[in-house]
Image (cartoon, rainbow, N blue to C red):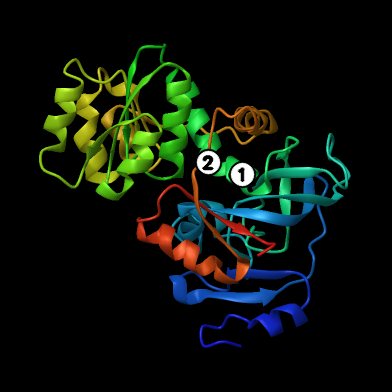
Amino acid sequence: MSDRGVPTREMWRALATNMSLGYRSFGGAEVQEYFDRPTPAPGPTEVLIRVASAGVNPLDHLLRSGHVPALNSHVPFPQVLGMEAAGTVLAVGTAVEGLTVGYRVFGFALTGAGTYSTTTLLLAEATARTPEGLPDTWAATIPVANTTALDALDQLALPAGSVLLLNGVGGGVGLATAQLARDRGLTVVGTGSSGKRELATAAGVTFIDYTAADVVGRLRAVAPDGFDGVIDMVGGESLRAVVPLAVKPDAVLSVGGPSVADLGGAPVARRLDRATLGRVAELMAAGRLDPNITGVHSLETAGEALALVESGHALGKLVIDMQL
């Protein structure tokens, strides 16, 4: 065992095939550990997959830290990190329809079952087939970030020609939203730190660096008549600052701030279903949506990927490839 508690390459190969990265209590990165676990058996509405790739998201460290008790406070330990994955079906529950052993699929894991693992359980209703030719690394980015983008834009339902503000555009959700918004004929303005300028502008965003002075003033200069819609990925004071820039408060949605309802807006309403997953996969397969994967990690270095996301400095999307 290495100094960081990570199995060495030789030990890794000698261990059983269901290695996982998770935690036995809530806390910071210090509670993360690798462990082997029995291969889980799918319940009636569940799908067991061999994980090929897993997405890394802010939700992963929020669950580990115990900051979303409604989702995992009732789940027994140890819990495995991760909520989205792509792979191959190994078994299906008795009530599962439309999926069978051998299918390539992607979807949402059961909370606590995790995806930083060589096998996991997915919710059948939130699992879809992976289109031919779509890499597993791409498919694994769809369930959390990319369906959030689609849900937000469908909820706003802005007509072509509208001006949309994305507050915090440089991460996976922001970049996906920018691409899908441009595909709908919207003009997109986005805020982010200076290091995220290149990715944002490549997605067709008019970029405003929020680390510089007078962000609100510069946004008003770009859209003097106000923004037809605002989608926030940041929350907090940053959200409060941009709400007055919307033409009307109910045109403000937030992924990152539950306080948006107090400001007249609404949280993004999520649709965790097979149809929504399939719509996003089709957009990717057609070349209309790029997940902007900026880093691919092995399961052995998954903790490093999560640390980067937790720092807030990750660009685009990070994934874990089980073949590395």
Q: Is residue 225 left or right of residue 213?
A: right
Residue at 35% of width from left, 55% of height from top? 312
Residue at 84% of width from left, 34% of height from top? 98
Image quadrant occupied by the C terminus = bottom right
The residue indicated by pointer 2 is 291
Q: Is residue 253 left or right of residue 223?
A: right
Question: In this rendering, is residue 269 above or below 140?
Answer: above
* Nearest to N terminus: mark 2 or mark 1: 1
Number of marks drawn: 2
| Residue 95 falls in image quadrant | top right
SS under mark 1: helix
Residue at 83% of width from left, 43% of height from top? 103
The residue indicated by pointer 1 is 138
Residue at 20% of width from left, 27% of height from top? 244
SS under mark 2: loop
| Mark 1 residue type | Trp
Percent position of residue 137, x then y: 63, 49
Q: Which mark is residue 110?
A: none
Image quadrant occupied by the N terminus = bottom right
Q: Is residue 223 left or right of residue 201?
A: left
Instruction: Mark yes or no: residue 77 visible.
Output: no
Task: Name the foreground residue: 282 vs 238.
Answer: 282
The answer to whether mark 2 and mark 1 are in CB contact below 8 A is yes
Percent position of residue 245, x then y: 21, 25
Question: In this rendering, is residue 31 above or below 110?
Answer: below
| Mark 2 residue type | Pro
Task: Name the foreground residue: 42 vs 98.
Answer: 98
Q: CA distance from mark 2 to mark 1?
A: 6 Å
| Residue 34 falls in image quadrant | bottom right
Q: Residues within 10 Å of mark 2 (few under 14, many from 20)?
A: many
Percent position of residue 204, x then y: 37, 29
